[in-house]
Amino acid sequence: MNWYVKKGDEFTNKKVVKFPFYRAVTSLNNLTFSTALYIHNGVGEVPYLKNEDCKLVATLTSNLSKIPASEFDLVSSPSGTYYKIWYDIEMSFEASISFRLLFKGEVLGVLDVDYGRR
């Protein structure tokens, strides 16, 4: 698990947090990705692995199929070749938390979560 925001961090509606991500895929036939977004409700340090104190906030689904294969890194390894697809997820704070998946600056997925109703 990667944790990008911690308890006690202060945010305003002008602050945007950007998370770098990548996916390793062997086939470009299905480039629809779902990214689960969690919060930690437990006491103390956040866990290295998901546990019972982690609650799913939302799932961001994005379709990168319109991106040409030449935009992805082709990696060769002893176990075969795969594509490494780099993208960012941005999180902003207003009346809801907004998440956006960006590939080279282009928005390919958007999700708004009303955290007051969670």
Image (cartoon, helix red, strand yellow):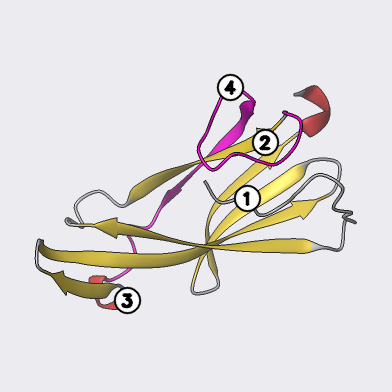
Q: Mark 3 points at which residue?
A: 71
Q: Residues within 10 Å of mark 2 (few under 14, many from 20)?
A: some
Question: Between disc 4 and disc 1, whose residue precedes?
Answer: 1
Q: Give the range drawn in magenta.
A: 42-68
Q: How crowded is mark 3: few (under 14 residues within 10 Å), some or many (20 or more)?
A: few
Residue type pointed to by label 1: Trp
Residue sitting nearer the eye, 78 or 70? 78
Q: Which residue is drawn at 82% across and 63% down?
A: 15
Q: Left or right: where does residue 64 sit relative to residue 111?
A: left
Q: Quadrant of the C terminus?
A: top right
Count of numbered labels shown in the rendering: 4
Asked if the residue under mark 1 is in contact with the one under mark 4, i.e. CB atoms within 8 Å, the reply is no
Mark 4 highlights which residue? 52
Instruction: Say what secondary structure mark 3 lies in.
Output: helix
85 or 70, which lies in front?
A: 85
Q: Name the residue under label 1.
A: 3
